[in-house]
Amino acid sequence: MSEHVHAAPVSPWARRVRLVVSHAALYLVAAAFVSPLVYMVATSLKRADEVFGSPPSLLGSVLRWENYSEAFEFLPFGRFVINGLAVAVCGTVVVLVASSMSAYAFSRLRWRGRDGVFLVFLATLMIPQEVLVVPMFMLMRWFGWVDSYQALIFPWAFTAFGTFMLRQFFLTIPEELAESARLDGAGAVRVFTSIMLPLIKPALAVLAVFTFINYWNSFLWPLIIINSVDEKATVPLGLQLFFGQQGTQWNLIMAAAVISMAPTTALLIILQKHLVRGIATSGLGGR
């Protein structure tokens, strides 16, 4: 005998209370995440003697927009931004090209030992970056690339994350599309560039954003591999130079930190449509 258990009806008043509580919790969590950003922007517009003034205030007596121009004069911060952009853009391009080609080889091309090689390649994801720093530095020294831009770009451009993610997208594309293109006379390169790549644009956008942010925020590797800091430092390495030279100018540090957010924010806005679609279809959103 089957038994049907009916849930007790929820009154409109209870639904309203539940809605108010859930919204209040969401607003509190959002405020906790946004408050450091607001404090950073507000501090970037204060005078130096008002940063730790008493009583504390969110904004100072005047808004000092000059802090942003002084951040570029205090150190060669513009050079650091250009270096960071060059490294992040070049690294992202290399990662997209290498990951898409390897993902296509692991998903669509048939060759002996393909699945075994892919498992070994995938296992490298479990090796933390800190373990790879010393052998990577020795390899760069063997190449003669220490204190160079290529040392900032290439060592981390061939990781398994991008290959794995793009491979999963390639596997969702029906093989009949490639077969039809081959029947029409398209070669392997034409099938890859004209048929397959346009179909995985959302995945490429997700990988591009993640890769750009990783390169842009990288601190440990540039700290180790770069010697001529004034010429080749990236933004995270340049930010720590604000400490210890003629004291710590917190208002200038905050202004530089706000400036450092601009490229990643612009990239997220530009690729927002593809990014949302890519995360939703790849399962990176936790569904």
Image (tube, rainbow, N blue to C red):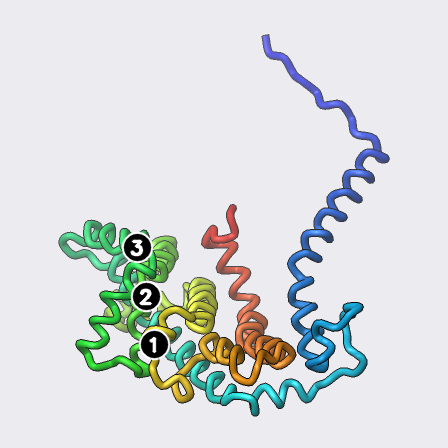
Label 3: element kind: loop
Label 2: element kind: helix
Query: Three-letter amino acid code at disc 1?
Result: Leu
In percent of the image, x 77 and y 68: which residue is there? 56
In this view, the mark in front (1 or 2):
1
- Marks 1/2: CA–CA distance: 18 Å
In percent of the image, x 27 and y 80: which residue is there? 146
Query: Three-letter amino acid code at disc 2?
Result: Ser
**Residue pointed to by mark 1:** 152
Of mark 2 and mark 3, the one earlier in the sequence is 2
**Residue pointed to by mark 3:** 127
The one of 54 and 127 positioned closer to us in this rendering: 54
Quadrant in the rendering for residue 175: bottom left
Query: Three-letter amino acid code at disc 3?
Result: Ile
**Residue pointed to by mark 2:** 99
In percent of the image, x 22 and y 50: which residue is there? 115
In percent of the image, x 58 and y 78: which residue is there? 248
Quarter of the picture holding the N terminus: top right
Asked if residue 53 is positioned above or below residue 177 in the image, the reply reads: below
Give how far across and how far down residue 36 sits, in percent. Answer: 65, 64
Label 1: element kind: helix
Q: Residues within 10 Å of mark 3 (few under 14, many from 20)?
A: few
